[in-house]
Amino acid sequence: MTNPTAMQVPPRDGDPEITPEIVADHGLTPEEYEKVLKIMGRDPTFTELGVFSAMWSEHCGYKNSKRLLRLLPTQAPWVIQGPGENAGVIDVGDGYALAFKIESHNHPSAVEPYQGAATGVGGILRDIFTMGARPVAVLDSLRFGDLDSGRVRYLFAGVVNGVGDYGNCVGIPNVGGEVQFDRGYEGNPIVNAMCLGLMRHEELITAAATGNGAPLMAVGARTGRDGIHGATFASEELSEDSDESSRPQVQVGDPFTEKLLLEASLELIASGAISGIQDMGAAGITSSASEMAGRGGSGVELEMTDVPVREDGMTPYEILLSESQERMLVVAHPGREDEVREILEKWELEAAVIGQVTDDGKFRILENGNVVGDIPALPLTDGCPTYEREGIESEEVIALREMDLTEHMTEEGDLTKDFLLLLRSPNVASKRWIYEQYDTTVRTGTAVRPGGDSGVIRIRGTKRAIAATTDCNGRLVYLEPRTGAMAAVAEAARNLVCVGALPTAITNNLNFGNPLKTHIYYQLREAVLGMREACSAFETPVTGGNVSLFNETDGKAIYPTPVIGMVGVIDDVSKIIHHAFKSAGDDIVLLGTNSGEIGGSEYLYVTSKLVAGNPPSLDLEAERLLQQAVLKMNHEEVLNSAHDCSQGGLAATLAECALGNGETPLGVSAEVDEDLAPIVSLFGESHGRIIASTSPENTERVLALAALYDVPAKRIGTVTDMASGFSIKVRSGSVQARMTDLAEAYFGSIPNIMDAPTGSEA
C-alpha cells in the first residue's frame, strides 16, 4: 500500500521484513495493522512498527478501557490537574498542592519479583517529581495466592524486599497500604504502588513539548536493553514458561541513581531552564516523546546516535523501546542547554540533546542523520483504536453468588475457636511483619504510621496534614462487580474519616483479566460504573491512575481488583485520632448497622475455603452521612478512637482496637443485641460500620451527633484493662479469650517467609 504524499522511508539494513507473523508478535490485530497502513500511507518500517506496537498496547493506549474511563467524574473546584498528565494534582490549602497517583507493576513482578516491585516504586516516584512535587510518602497495594504455596512465598518475599529496598534507599517513607492472600491471585500477583508529593502551586510543571526548535534532552541514566517491549509484555497474558522468556522485558532499577535524579529534576524545574519534563516509563523514549508532542500539539525529531547508551550496537528500535530506569525527557529553553547539563553534572548524571521540538506534527526518528521513522505524531496517542466490547456475566459467578450459605451460619454457643482461627488469618492478622521492613518515618513527617486505618503525613509550616489509603476487596468485586467497586470507594473514605480526614480525591488502579473475554469485560464495565456512582456520591473525583489488564496465567484470571487510592485533608493535626482504644473505662460505640450478609467474608474463606454468596449490600447515602457524622465528632473532639469495621467483621475489629500496636493492649467487654445468627453478628462484613470509643461523659454527645446525621448508633460495651480479657456476647453466641491469646494469634501467627528461597522454583 503506497501513497505518493507519504514520505518513503527505506528499510534499515539488518531489520527484519514486516510479515503477518511479525505484526502479530507486536500485539496488533490485522484490523489494527490496516489502520496503521492508512495512517502511514505505506508499509511501516520495523522501527515504526515497534513504535505503533508500544503506543497502541493496552498499557499505553488504554484501548479496551478508555471509553469506560471517560465515564468517571474528574472535576471539582479543588482539582488543579486531572487525568492526562503524569499525576493528578489537587489543592490542599495554605498555597500547597498535592500530586498523587497509583500504578501497577504486575507482570514484571510475576516474572522477577524483586526488580518488578522495585522499578514499580521507582516509576511512580518519577511520575510525582516530574510534576514539580517532592515525594513525601508511598503506599503499596499487594495481592498474592495463599501462603501455603512455596511459589507464592518466593514472589511475596521478593516483592516486599523490592518495595522496601527501593523506597528506603531513596528516602521516602512507606506510610500504609494493604495486602491480601487468596487463591484467586495464585498465578498473577498484583503489585500496585502509590506516591504522594507536595509542592507550592507555582511549582507545578506539565509534560508538553512546545516551541519549534526547542531542544529535547535525555537526562539521568543511560539507555540499555532492559525492559524492551515492557509495555507490550504488560498487555498480554502470562503462561507457565513466562518466567524465563519474559525476564529480559523486566527493567532493572537503581534507587541511588533515582535519588540523584529526583534532586536534579526538582532543581532543574526550579531553575526555569526547562518548559516540560516527563518520565521515560512504559515504552521509554517512544511514549515520553510522543505524549509530550501530543499534549503540545507539536512534532518531535529524535537522533538515535545522540542518545547516551550503555551497550554497543543498539538499534533505533531498541533505543526507542527500552524501558531502562531512572531516565527523563525534558524540553529545554533554547540557549539554556548548558545550564541543564551543569545541574545534571552537579548530581553526577548525564544530560544530552537528542532532538528538537518541531511544528510539523511528525514523530521523526533519525540515525546518523538518516530518517528511519516518520510517523504522524497525533495518531500515536489520540489515534489508538478504542473498543466497547460485549460484557456478559459468568454463569459460574452467578451460581456462586446465589449459593445457599445457611449451613455455614448455624453454629452457636462458644465461638472463640473460630474467632482465633480468623484472627490468625494473614488477611486479618497484623501486617507489622511486613511494614517493619519499610522505613516509615524517614524525613520525620509521618504523623500516623502503618497499622491503622490511613497513613498521615504533615505539611510542614502549617497545621495541615494529608491522609492516604489504598483499598479494595477483590472477592466482593468478583461476586458482584458494581457493588464491590462501590464498596472499595466507601471503605477508603471510611478509613480516611477514621483518622479525621475529609475524603477529597482518588487515583485508581484497575487490575483485571483479559477484556477480550465477555465475562471479564463485564467485570470491568460494572466496576467502573460502581466507582463512578460512589465517587459522585462522595464528591471524590478521579484525578488519574492506571489500568492493568490481561492479568491471567494459562487462561485463569485474577479476581477483578479495582484498587482505590484515596487522599484526604486534615485541617488540624492536633485532632488526628487512631484506631486503638485509648483508656480503660471508655465507652465503645458502634456506628452503623449490620445488614446481615456473610457472602465474600474472610470467615467463609478461613473455615471453608469458600468465596461465595451475596456480598454485603451498600447504601451510599448512609455511607456519606456516616462520614459527615464522624468528621463532626472529630471536630468537636468527642472521640478517643475510631476504626473501620471491614475484613473479619465486628469481632476482629474490636480485637484490633484492643490490641493496637501491641505495646499497651487493653480489654473489651461488649454485648451486641442483633436479631442475627451469631456467625453473622460476629464475623459478617457489612459495610457502613465504624467502632468508636469515647469518654463516658461524651457518650451522649456522640449518640446525639449520630442521630443528627441519621446514623444508627448504640453503646455496645466498655474498654477494660488487659487482665479483664476479651468478651463479646451476641444473642446465642459469644467469644471469650485472654488478651495474651489474642496477641499471640494476631501478632505471632504468620510464618517467617521473608527468608524464602530466591529461586523461582521455590
Image (cartoon, rainbow, N blue to C red):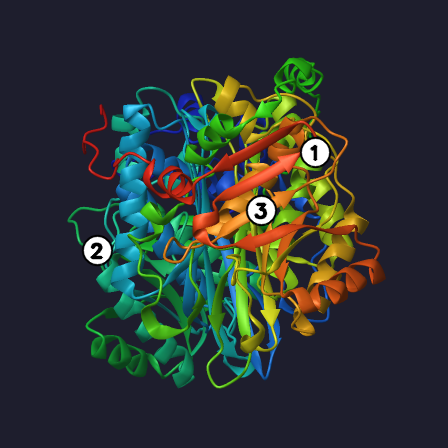
Three-letter code, disc 2:
Val
Q: Position of residue 487 (x, y in %)?
A: 67, 42
Q: Position of residue 370 (x, y in %)?
A: 32, 53
Which residue is pictured at 55% across the width and 61% down the height? 85
Q: Earlier in the sequence, mark 1 or mark 2?
A: 2
Q: Is residue 309 above or below residue 601?
A: below
Task: Residue under label 2, please give it.
Answer: 309
Q: Position of residue 587 (x, y in %)?
A: 63, 58
Which residue is pictured at 28% across the width and 39% down the height? 157
Helix, strand, or loop for circle 2?
A: loop
Disc 1 to disc 3: CB gap under 8 Å: no
Which residue is pictured at 49% across the width and 48% down the height? 656
**Camera-side residue of 715 and 573:** 715
Nearest-to-viewer mark from 1 and 3: 3
Q: Earlier in the sequence, mark 2 or mark 3?
A: 2
Task: Residue under label 3, please give it.
Answer: 669
Residue 342 as seen in the image, left or right of residue 38: left
Task: Residue under label 1, please give it.
Answer: 616
Q: Could you tell me how many numbered marks the image carries?
A: 3
- Crowd tier of the residue under label 1, counting other residues whose Cα lies within 10 Å: few below 14, some 14–19, many 20 or above: many
Three-letter code, disc 1:
Pro
Q: Position of residue 437 (x, y in %)?
A: 28, 52
Give the alpha-carbon distance from disc 1 to disc 3, as whole Å: 27 Å
